[in-house]
Image (cartoon, helix red, strand yellow):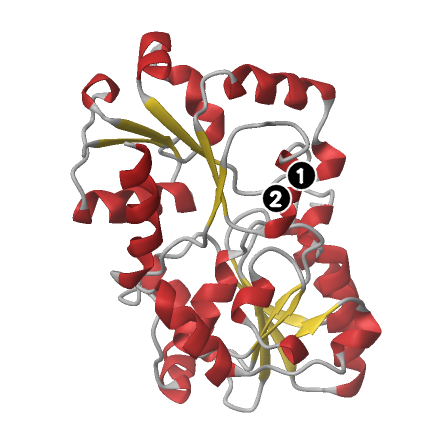
Amino acid sequence: MKFFLAVANENWICDRFASEWREHFDTTKNSAHADVVWILSPYVWRSIPLQVLKSKKVVVTIHHIVPEKFTKDTFREFLERDKFVDYYHITCEQTEQFIKKITKKPIFKHLFWVNPQNWFEIDKQAVRQKFNLSDNAYLIGSFQRDTEGHDLKSPKLEKGPDLFCDILEKINNERENLEVVLAGWRRQYVMNRLKKSGIRYHYYELPELSVVNELYNCLDLYIVAARCEGGPQSIVECASNKTPIISTDVGIASEILAENSLYSNINDFFNASPNVDLAAENVKKHHIPDGFRGFINFLENIG
């Protein structure tokens, strides 16, 4: 079976998934030569010839949907694309429940695979020395964008940057040694909040994957404060390299993390605790090559 993977080529997670799939399976750069067209970046579907969409098995991955941002125009676009879709792939129950209301097409729910060559444990002290981070600091991390692109100051509320900063400010009242490690782009909202609160932070904009893995290994805690997510990938990445993590119960969190590592509000957060061993055990079945197995079975059955 030959696959064509449609991605936006914008250095996002979809491009990494496509690259990893291509390393292991028969793919083509010409959609007309494929048996299955897998649209990993849903918004690029119009770049595929109409005749291809009509004649091939078409799978679309919906990474997540923010209900508050699902406008009439978004709905109209979804329905237009839905005419050519044979199957949807989603990663979490929240997304499944949403799209079930607007499509009758079959839905395949499965977490993406995880590459253990990218996410692995490193000696914390050695990595802190490399980045000139104090051994005495209590380092909390966040590596996902938090600011809307249209003005680079408004919080991207589905990611929960306001909640993240509320938690940090409360921790800062109790810990003099708090420092924050930020990575990724569009971090302006959080950085501005931290500046106002007098919380020291270290920012690494769009680092290489190897550097991101090192930064994870520097941390005492990673916090996911999102209100709506399909992943986030930080959960499986933290689980793979045994970075302590606490998360809101969004996306795939409950499939990987212990129940007592989940929280619902700022007060509940302080009752939560990481469980790195359970998270590491839960994520193993998604490691390459085992992590491909569910997708292989699904795609072979529809091809």
Q: Is residue 113 left or right of residue 242?
A: left
Which residue, given by chain and number where applicable, does mark 1 sit on? 98
Q: Position of residue 200 (x, y in %)?
A: 65, 72
Tell which of 252 and 96 is nearer to you: 96
What residue is rendered at 55% in x and 14% in y? Answer: 80
Which residue, given by chain and number where applicable, does mark 2 sit on? 95
What residue is rendered at 41% in x and 64% in y? Answer: 212
Q: Position of residue 177 (x, y in %)?
A: 66, 86
- Quarter containing the C terminus: top left
Quarter where residue 95 is shown: top right
Quick one: SS at disc 1? helix
Q: Is residue 54 left or right of residue 276?
A: left
User: For the view shown, which residue lies furthest in the right direction?
Assistant: 267
Which mark, by number, is residue 198? Answer: none
Give the amino acid type for the residue marked by disc 1 in the picture: Phe
Tell which of 301 and 31 is nearer to you: 301
Q: Tell me: residue 102, above or below residue 301.
A: above
What residue is rendered at 34% in x and 48% in y? Answer: 295
Give the amino acid type for the residue marked by disc 2 in the picture: Thr
Asked if residue 131 can be seen in this view, the reply is: no
Disc 2, disc 1: CB below 8 Å? yes
What residue is rendered at 44% in x and 66% in y? Answer: 237
